[in-house]
Amino acid sequence: MRRSVCALVLCVLWPTSPVAADEPANLTVTGRRPAGDDDLSDWLRNAVQAHRYSPAETGLALDLSEKEVSDACARLNIDPAAAYPAQNDGRLWILPYPGGRHPRIGFLEGAVDPQRETKFSVFTPWQPADGLRADYVVADIPEAIWSNLGLTYLAHTHVPTVWTKSGITLPVLEWTRHPHGILSLSRTLPNGIAFSSLVVPEHDHVAMRLTLTNGTDQALTDLRVQNCVMLKAADGFNPQTNDNKVSRAPYTAVRNAEGNRWILTAWKPNHRTWANDKCPCLHSDPKFPDCAPGETKTLRGWLSFYEGTDIEAEFDRIEALNWWDDELPEAQ
């Protein structure tokens, strides 16, 4: 009896999520049921306290009914209205993206059933005071990898990859979480190509690294990568237009309506910068050097926030840091 009463109270006090209101009824999302109470507790806090998900969204993400979500919150003493536990060391706040809520506003047909293992949320330093929602961007690292073999990896369903053409389903993965908020992910494809992502939150930016190892017996060329920063949940930065975006390769940035706050990203070696107004999103897409059998190649990425009006000067300041040469800590 006590559990059901607690669950009812939690449902009543659950913060309303404005972001959820425009989700289409036919949204395709494959939920991932947590493996045990520790895993369930982590994902519930991530979804309901950090991302301010509704019970329905949380259920979609975690393959649970709304009642199971409320009951689990009551049993594990998770208050959906409470703040997410404090982050560490004053670094920018990042978390694995829980899924459930589609990270795009539009062009959903180009990203059916988005896989959460490549996606992480970067929370803006300009969080709303009411606590009823969270402001964040969703980075998809990598969203896609091409090679001379064709579309070699894709983090959602849209166009066929070399694997879907062969009837091969890639296994589901998750980010590994490390001290100081660091995230890592490694995947080996059926033909021996392996790639890994490392995401390191710093005090003023998020440092990123992608590596690719050629485990095949032939050279890999045309290794283009698509990395996406989706703006749906960043209030003021998410109009479906490209008029609020500026690019100077490798940097691309989006401003708020007042023009005094910016979100920017960059990758090197750079292939192209662009933006999709329908999603809306930012792209600084890199390209791996050609990779002989047994070789490993590396890309470096940057994401940060800027408060001011001179974005060109901010590009210059960041470029002068030579950030792509910085050593990143290895995930422990």
Image: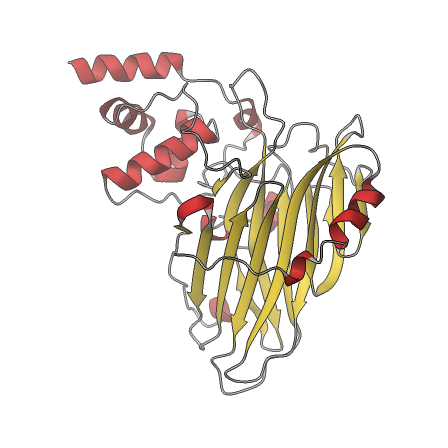
- State which quadrant residue 47 falls in: top left
- State which quadrant residue 72 falls in: top left
Q: Is residue 142 above or below residue 229?
A: below
The answer to whether any part of residue 279 appears in the image is no
Q: Where does the image place residue 314, in percent across and percent down from the top left?
A: 79, 43
Q: Is residue 115 left or right of residue 306?
A: left
Q: Is residue 329 above or below residue 75?
A: below
Foreground pick, 324 / 227 = 324
Residue for point 64% across, 47% down: 303
Q: Where does the image place residue 70, in percent across and percent down from the top left?
A: 31, 23
Foreground pick, 280 / 302 = 302
- What colour scheme was applied to this rendering of the protein? secondary structure
Residue for point 50% across, 36% down: 101
Residue for point 54% across, 27% down: 134
Residue for point 84% across, 38% down: 310
Q: Is residue 331 above or below residue 28?
A: below
Residue at the bottom extreme?
Answer: 217
Quadrant of the image for the N terminus?
A: top left
Q: Is residue 108 left or right of residue 89?
A: right
The answer to whether any part of residue 306 appears in the image is yes
Quadrant of the image for the C terminus?
A: bottom left
- State which quadrant residue 38 falls in: top left
Task: Count all numbered tags in the image, as a single digit.
Answer: 0
Q: Where does the image place residue 75, in percent across and percent down from the top left?
A: 22, 25
Q: Where does the image place residue 82, in percent across and percent down from the top left?
A: 40, 20
Foreground pick, 221 / 304 = 304
